[in-house]
Amino acid sequence: MLTPPLSSKTPPMISMREISKSFPGVVANDHIDFDIFRSEIHVLLGENGAGKSTLMKILYGFYRADSGRILLDGKPAAIQSPNDARALQIGMVFQDFTLIPAFSVAENIALFLPDLDTVVDLEAVSLWIEEMSARYGLRVNPDAMVYELSIGEQQKVEILKLILSNSRLLILDEPTRVLAPHEVDALFQILYSMRQDGYAIILITHKIKEVLECADRITVLRNGCVAGSLLRSNASEDKLVEMMFGRKLSGLKTGKKVIREETALPVLELQNVHTHGEGAETNLEEIDLKVYPGEIVGIAGVSGNGQRELGDVVLGMIECVKGTKHLFGKDVTNSSIQKLRRSLVGFIPENPLTMAAAPFMTVLENMAVTKTWHYALQGGLTMDWKAIKADVENTMERLGFSFSLNIPARSLSGGNLQRMIIVRELTHDPRLIIASYLTRGLDVQSTLAARQALIQARDDGAGVLLISEDLEELFMLSDRLIVLYGGRIVGSFTPDETNYYEVGHLMTGSEVQYASNS
Amino acid sequence: MRQILNALKRSDWVGQKYVNAVLRYVFMMLFAFLLFGIILLISGKDPIQSYKDIFSSTLGSAYGLSEVIVTMTPLLVTALAVALPSRIILINIGVEGQLYMGACFATWGALAFGHLPAWILLPMMILLGMAGGSLWAFIPGYLRAMGIVNETITTLLLNSVAPMIVSFFVFGFWHSPMDTNKTAIFSPSARLPTLFNTRIDLSLVFALVLLTLFWLVMKYTRWGLEMRAIGGNPQAARRNGIPVKLYLISIMCIGGAIAGLAGMAQVSGFYGVLLANFSRGIGFMGFLISWLAGGSPLGILLTSFVISIIIRGGNLLQLTIDLPYAVINVLLAFTLFVVLARPNFLTQRKEA
């Protein structure tokens, strides 16, 4: 879909035209058009992996587009590095801040100024900071050390940094991710006052509620394409949810929806599970979940809301602070990962390279590491490589995948790496499969094959926990659907009972109040 | 010269990679010797003559060669004690301390059971030495596996504790009537047998067997596979159900046991007596060698050999041309420097 022409009093400050960028195995941006106007807050909305960050990193010179051009006030601009972007008064606040903790606020900002004197006059910088922070309500103490500041204050410093270095366009990458609700309000107030002074602001987010609160103009990305661009006045929650998640249905044969026997013993049962997250991890709270044999339970949620933690807590990577975990009726709350793995639990993590594979070992060796006891010969003195190869090739044939087995895993493309993990985890007829982002990075055909494999496993009586952000996939495959938001279960349905809108709202937190009250 | 190299490269050798690697090391050594030659010139010595002396005294005679091997033997073992844990990303700087503990335990065996015949006493001392080393390595291994403190720090700090413990026993209880800083000379049954009428002792066989075993285990066994998986991606290994904690502790202990064996071999084979402060950095040298060799068994063998030549040669230079012993540390440092800088003029062009 092309950008519909939108009325505006002024010509755009920056236009991005036909921007395309692909990474090995993924098309991140596919002919994207994007306009930024002065005195406007432009929200870039989309699921994770929709291509928002990539597009903005291209604008900031962090990546280079494969094709397309960027126009500044109608004239072509060459942005090849963040330095070029800053020279053109474009500034970006990344998700992970770039402040130096051991420096004071003034020192951090001084470091970033484009024309810093040889002898730094911190006093002058401090004065300047105070002047600007008063103007936009960005109250920070210039002499405070950064490590003493809260996340919200650090963000203010990042924004100040850009203002003081003359940026006129600010790109904020998921600025509200780390903020408490009242901090979010404060941030929006700052953005409004900046808008009045003619700043252009791009805000990347996937939270619809916030979009409707602060945006002037909204562009929705889906799968690397522009799903639509509209003014705030034309936007509604339903419309945005539809644009974000799309409604097209592919022709996959989903097989029979199994009516499970209520009497059957659940494969997996979590009772009132709580976890304590470290660092950026989300705390899971009050998770009650049952997976029966022969059913696929879909877990919907925008990433960062506890899906990764849910998969990890089932596997035993994270311990339950409270609550119990049963596998096939046996209490495994404190069991080791080895024990769970031996009781036929397959795990397809969200990132195959960092979470499942050893990059410098060959594909075949990687296939063996989850089942070393199974393939050990003579008590472990040698490995039965023939058997491994036979088993793997068997599964590959069943799934219709093919890739080389004797090359290092790191030389596989992203899609093939995902195939490798899928093959490995489905090889031994697991009774419980935890699959996160099963089809990420796969082409259409492999996506079908992977989904088919999951359905087949279900029909053979395995319980499946399918974690995904792709509503289409979840509705197609799930027998039951659970929505996670902020580490809690905020909804539980069968796909027939609900629709994209309801789930989309729950995922993005726009109706979380309603759900937790009901 | 480049033409020869290119010709070598173009040839379809299976071992071409190894030829390149060996050539690279030879070039690096030459470069180090060149730098050291400048130092020799500055101090007014004839570098050519000095190098001639070094090589004729070490490689030029059977005796010289045997002395090089005597120097090399403990280095092989201590390097292995570093290389094994390094495969699962454990940095064992504590070989020195583990070696002292091994020597200490083994000495207790030698002193308390000196009357036993060698075929009982020696195996017992070996086990005691390994136990001492692994006990010392268990502390950092356990703390690391529990996520309490990084093993790099603990192993390093424990290095200064272990010699104190040895001193405590030597000065306090074990010293011989004549000396205060060493024990009585071990009974003959507590001495490792020597080979070929030289000072080379049985520990050379241990070292070579252990290196071979290390290579075989890493390449063929289930444990090698699991260790490579941990080394390749610890997080993935944990998710894949490999008992990472167990490996962290046990591999650290095995590393310590190997270091302890080196300590046992030093007191039982080389000295025949336990001296306070006997090691003079064998453990640290092993660390250096292991990292220079990239943890590969063959690399450890080659690097240890070269380093031993330098050490022996240094001793000789000190005697013959009156250079201070510290100068040999300069040569060692140059070697380290050049190897770490890894001038890759040989391999670079191939990728391009």
Image: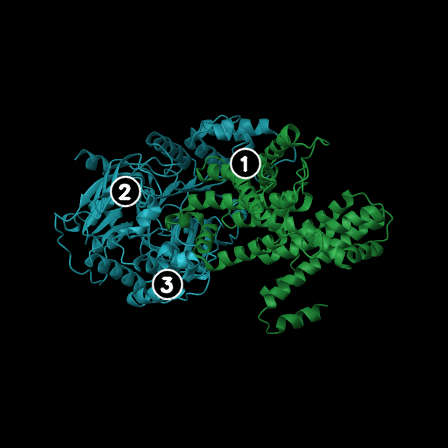
For the residues labelled 3 and 1, the Cα–Cα distance comes to: 40 Å
User: Do the residues at discs 2 and 3 belong to one chain?
Assistant: yes
Q: Which residue is mark 2?
A: A332
Image position, residue B295 (x, y; %): 57, 53
Residue positioned 28% across, 45% down in the render: A301
Quarter the N terminus of chain B occupies: bottom right
Palette colour of chain A:
cyan
Q: Chain of mark 3?
A: A
Q: Amino acid at mark 2?
A: Val
Q: Colour of chain B?
A: green
Res B187 quadrant in image: top right
Of the residues shown, which amino acid type is indicated by label 3? Ile
Residue at image mark 3: A388
Mark-to-mark CA distance, 1 and 2: 34 Å
Q: Measured from the top left, where is residue A143 in percent x and y?
A: 53, 25
Q: Return the x and y of residue B133 as percentages of the image width and height.
A: 55, 41
Q: In this view of the protein, which residue sits in the foreground, A431 or A477?
A: A431
- Image position of A150 (left or right of A496): right
**Vertical arrangement, residue B173 with respect to residue A444, above or below:** above
Q: Are marks 2 and 3 in contact (CB under 8 Å)?
A: no
Visible residue check, residue A11: no
Q: In x, y percent, where is residue A326?
A: 24, 43
Q: Chain of mark 1?
A: B
- Name the image quarter holding residue A24: bottom left
Q: Residues within 10 Å of mark 3 (few under 14, many from 20)?
A: many
Of residues B193 and B88, the one drawn nearer to the viewer in this rendering: B193
How far apart marks 2 and 3 lie (CA) works out to: 28 Å
Could you say whether the residue bearing mark 3 is in a helix, strand or loop? helix
**Mark 1: amino acid:** Thr
* Relative side of A309 to A58, left or right: left
Q: Which residue is mark 1?
A: B154
Give the vertical position of A196 relative to B292 (above or below): above
